[in-house]
Image (tube, grey):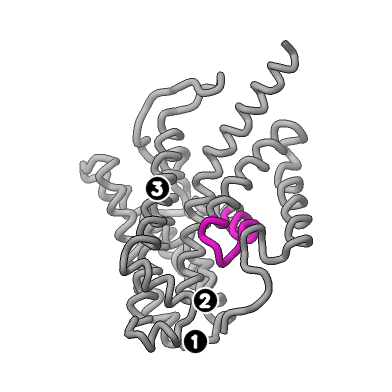
Amino acid sequence: MKRGEEMHDLLSVIFSGLVSGSLYALLGLSIVIIFRATDVVNFAIGDIATIGVYVAMTVISLGVPVVAALPVTFLVAGMIGVGVERFMIRPLGPGNMFSALIITMGFGLVLQAIIGTIWGYNPRPFPPIIDGNATVFGVAITYQKLLATGLAVVAMLLISALFNWTRIGLAMRASAEDHFAARMIGIKSTRVASLAWFLGCGLAGITAFIMAAETSVGVALMAMVLFRAFAGVFLGGLTNMIGAAAGGMMIGILDNVAGSYVSASFRDTMVFAVIVVILFIRPSGILGAKGGARV
């Protein structure tokens, strides 16, 4: 009986980790979409997503239903992403990855200042998408968390379908693999880059919206989520979309297992100790490309 209870508890912990990990996976996928298309690690993605949520909150205050405000977040974050790519990243030209990284970090700080000036720095309550609780594996979990997991999974499936079964997706994959060859066959890399930034930042906006609905909205809304999403990306592989999603899920599970069976105070330490060991064995990540580099 005791063994059965321990197994039940472990399943509960793993399930809770998968629920949290689905958001890390979605945000990690957003990061990889942008990186694969433009070779830019967008450190402003969390702040871009956050400002989309603040705009959605303003729309909700005007009487728009919470669910209807979700597309607003996606569009606002996506359009800001397009603007960043067009006016900040594209003028740098190819091969300026470090400069682009610094620009995105600086732009993130600018967005934080804009948020603080317009909406203030103190966290604000955000209405839930759905109320109520369910019991899964003996664990009480809100319908909102289940909905969040469902939205994240659906978004990842749609992105997978886009990249594998549509002409636009195939063009993005071709451009990601070889920019020069893609241009030679008529693919416009500038359009691919704009679309990648729109999708990546828009998906990050969905992640931020879900996070705000679970907690509250503030300037630092995406700080810890982004931290874990990047960990998942590097664990799964920065060049592999499936790896980014799988890495996010693994981070969620590791985080929960460490917090439940080791210590809540050392959960981050345990999680990143495991990541360091894995990356020491396989630097490119579990599903990342071994050897070679893109030029």
In the image, residue 252 lies at what x, y percent? 60, 43
In the image, residue 136 lies at what x, y percent? 51, 23
Residue reaching furthest top? 1
| Camera sees residue 81 | no
Which is more toward the observer, 278 or 118? Answer: 278
Q: Say above or below: 208 vs 108.
A: above
For the record, the magenta segment spans 229-244
Whether pointer 1 and pointer 2 mark residues with C-beta atoms closer than 8 Å, the reply is: yes
Disc 3 marks a residue whose amino acid type is Phe
Disc 2 marks a residue whose amino acid type is Asp
In the image, residue 54 lies at what x, y percent? 36, 53
Residue 65 part of the magenta-drawn span: no
Horizontal side of residue 7 vs 56, given as left or right: right
Disc 1 marks a residue whose amino acid type is Pro
Residue drawn at (50%, 47%) of the image: 23
- Callout 3: SS: helix
Q: Which mark is residue 163?
A: none
Which is more toward the observer, 212 or 159? Answer: 159
- Callout 1: SS: loop
Badge 2: residue crowd in 10 Å (few <14, some 14–19, many ≥20): many
In the image, residue 181 lies at what x, y percent? 44, 85
Residue 232 part of the magenta-drawn span: yes
Considering the image in quadrants, where does the C terminus appear?
bottom right
| Camera sees residue 42 | yes
The residue that label 3 is drawn on is: 209
Q: CA distance from mark 2 to mark 3?
A: 26 Å
The residue that label 2 is drawn on is: 39
The residue that label 1 is drawn on is: 94
